[in-house]
Image: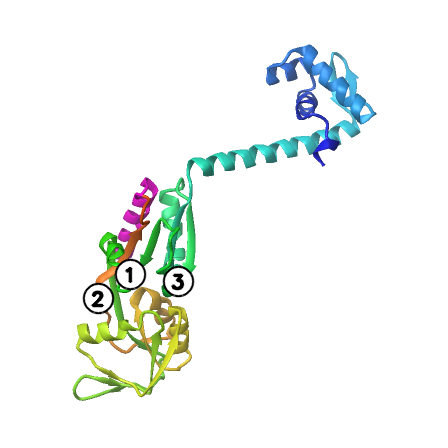
Amino acid sequence: MADRLPPLFTLRAFEAVARLGSVTRAAAELGRTHGAVSKQLRALHADAGLPLFDKVGTGLRANAAGRQLAAAVAAAFDGLADSYATVVREARSPALHVACSATFAMGWLVPHLAEFARAHPEVRIRLSMTSAREMRDERDADLVVLWDRSAYPAQDQARAIRLADARFGVVAAPDYPVARNDDGSLSADCRIVHDHTSSAWDRWTALSGIAVAAPRTLSFPHTHLCLGAAVAGMGIAMAERRLAAADLAAGRLVQVTGFTAFPHGFAAIPHRTRPPSPQSRLFLDWLAAALQADG
């Protein structure tokens, strides 16, 4: 396709003359001589096989064919300029790759990202959403944001940067039957468990001192599926307060218990070999402040 086009400078000279109505003014804008621009116009006329300008006094005015071509050339050069600027900007300011669970991304991070974008428009975020299990194998992300890092290697746990408390509690559909026993324990027909962070129930029981008895268990690989099952009345779920906030506010879920802070809380694990960039530090400072303000 490109070999059917005249040389780009010929088109640039033509567009400038059509826009300015003068070979002299076009030559000054392009930093070329009057003779060089005139030569480019003659070459374009010969290549096209038709005139593109009418003589008007001492200047030139594009005819119908010239105006049609000038509009197309101007749009093409504008598109090239925009694309070039985008490539340069992105090369000079590479994206910050953040990995987190799909539920955290959809339920909390994405709704809050506009705040970060307004504060730091120069930082581009590339977001990877995955499951808690797959996050353990993440090797490319600059930051991995999570709350349960018990299954991570010791060196990753040591590098984790604490961001804010993670507060967990039992939630259920408003009409789901939950018995509160005389000893303070709870009984329900079914307990909903996350496949890859099932220890949340045991941790919460140890911290809250409230035992939960349920003869049946349902298991799902994502927190939003666990919450969806609870909304559907399938059982009681263990939920982080921020991630259940929308369902609680809408009345789709109710608190069965209070929310208890887990000691390790939310954290970010930096890349294993790349040192944290200035963009990473900006994002971490914002994320910690935003999570704490919403805590």
Relative to 120, residue 183 above or below: below
Q: Position of residue 103 (x, y in %)?
A: 39, 64
Say whether marks 1 and 3 touch (CB < 8 Å): no
How far is the residue under mark 1 from the one under mark 3? 12 Å
User: Toward which corner of the image does residue 21 lie, by quadrant?
Assistant: top right
Q: Which mark is residue 67?
A: none
Look at mark 2 in the image and give the residue it sits on.
Answer: 261
Look at mark 3 in the image and give the residue it sits on.
Answer: 134
Q: Main secondary structure of the magenta part?
A: helix
Look at mark 1 in the image and give the residue it sits on.
Answer: 152
How far is the residue under mark 3 from the one under mark 2? 25 Å
The extreme right residue here reads 49
User: Toward which corner of the image does residue 17 lie, by quadrant?
Assistant: top right
Relative to 27, residue 146 above or below: below
Q: Quadrant of the C terminus?
A: bottom left
Q: Amino acid at mark 1?
A: Tyr
Q: Which residues are magenta?
A: 275-294
Q: Secondary structure at mark 3?
A: helix
Q: Is residue 282 magenta?
A: yes
Q: Secondary structure at mark 1?
A: loop
Q: Position of residue 105 (x, y in %)?
A: 39, 59
Instruction: Give the label, 3 or 2, closer to the camera.
Output: 3
Q: Nearer the viewer, residue 80 or 131?
A: 131
Which numbered disc, 3 or 2, marks the residue that appears first in the sequence?
3
Instruction: Give the label, 1 or 2, closer to the camera.
Output: 1
Q: Secondary structure at mark 2?
A: strand
